[in-house]
Structure formats: C-alpha cells, structure tokens
Amino acid sequence: MDRRSWLRAIAAAAGLTSLTLATSEYLQPQHAQDIRTVDLGPVDEVISDGARRVVNVGGQMVLLSRSADVVTALDLTCTHAGCPLAFDAKAQRIRCACHGGAFAITGEPVAGPPRTPLATLECRTDRGRLYIRTTRSTEV
C-alpha cells in the first residue's frame, strides 16, 4: 500500500468513526436535566452572614457560603470521578475520600486528581428568601 492510499484509508476510518458517534448520539434517548429554582426559605434562617453550611437540595449536596447579601453555592460532587465531597470546616477545604482530592472554598482544585473546579449553582435572594437553581430532583 502506498502512502496516499494509506492516508485515504486513515481519513475514511476517521470519518466513519465520527459518523458512527454522531448517529449513536442522535438515536439514543436524551436525558433531560430537570433545571428548577428551589425556595430554600428565609435567607437569614438558611445561612447567617459569614457562615458556610452544607445543605441537601433534593439529593444534591451543596455548600452554601454567605458574605453580607451574597450567597454562593457549590455542588459537592467531585469533578474527577463524581464522588460525594465533604466540607472540612477546620481546614477550610472540600475533600474527596475516593481519590484524595481537595478543593479550596472557591471550588478550585488544590490537591489530588481533580483538575476541574466544582460547579457553581446560581443563588439569588428575593424578598428575604433564598432561591437556588438545581439540575437534579427538587424535593427539599
């Protein structure tokens, strides 16, 4: 087989692989994400100013942090292998027991295999109540 024929065969195989993957993505049923806004309750009862607190939002563990009127939320699911994370208040770190990963309070990876920051969930306050947008089941 000459070089040109070999390159054509490689290009054809790559094209066929791409077509197969695109077709399988199209034919497989899509799992719609359930994106909803959940009312967590009065913001001052949910989390006090300067505090950090882990809450369960319909099975999704979330770390809330509050500074004055700004509340942030991090999804406590490891970005490496999907393991549940734990907040270590003493060390001010978020830890993964599966592979020894650790994240800063900002969600940035600081140790272990994770390289991707934690997902941030949208939070807002309205009329003194705290709302969070979640992508999972929404029973509180």
Image (spheres, rainbow, N blue to C red):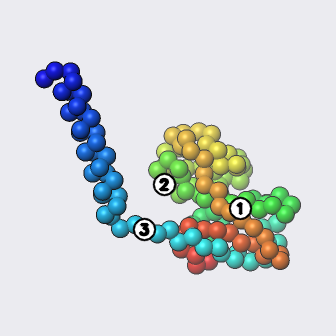
Label 3 Cα crowd, 10 Å radius (few <14 / some 14-19 / many 20+): few
Q: Give the residue type at disc 3.
A: His
Mark 2 Cα-neighbour bin, 10 Å: few <14, some 14–19, many ≥20: few
Alpha carbons under labels 1 and 3: distance apart: 27 Å
Q: Nearer the viewer, residue 47 or 131?
A: 131
Q: Earlier in the sequence, mark 1 or mark 3?
A: 3
Label 2 belongs to which residue?
82
- Seen in the picture, residue 80 relative to 9 is either above or below; the reply is below
Disc 3: which residue: 31
Q: Which residue is mark 1?
A: 64
Mark 1 or 3: the one toward you: 3
Q: Is residue 106 above or below residue 124?
A: above
Q: Position of residue 123 (x, y in %)?
A: 72, 65
Say if mark 2 contacts mark 3, CB within 8 Å: no
The numbered mark, 1 or 2, whose residue comes first in the sequence reads 1
Residue 83 in the image, given as x and y percentages of width and height: 49, 55
Three-letter amino acid code at the position of disc 2: Gly
Query: How far across and down, in percent of the image, does residue 56 sit?
Result: 61, 69
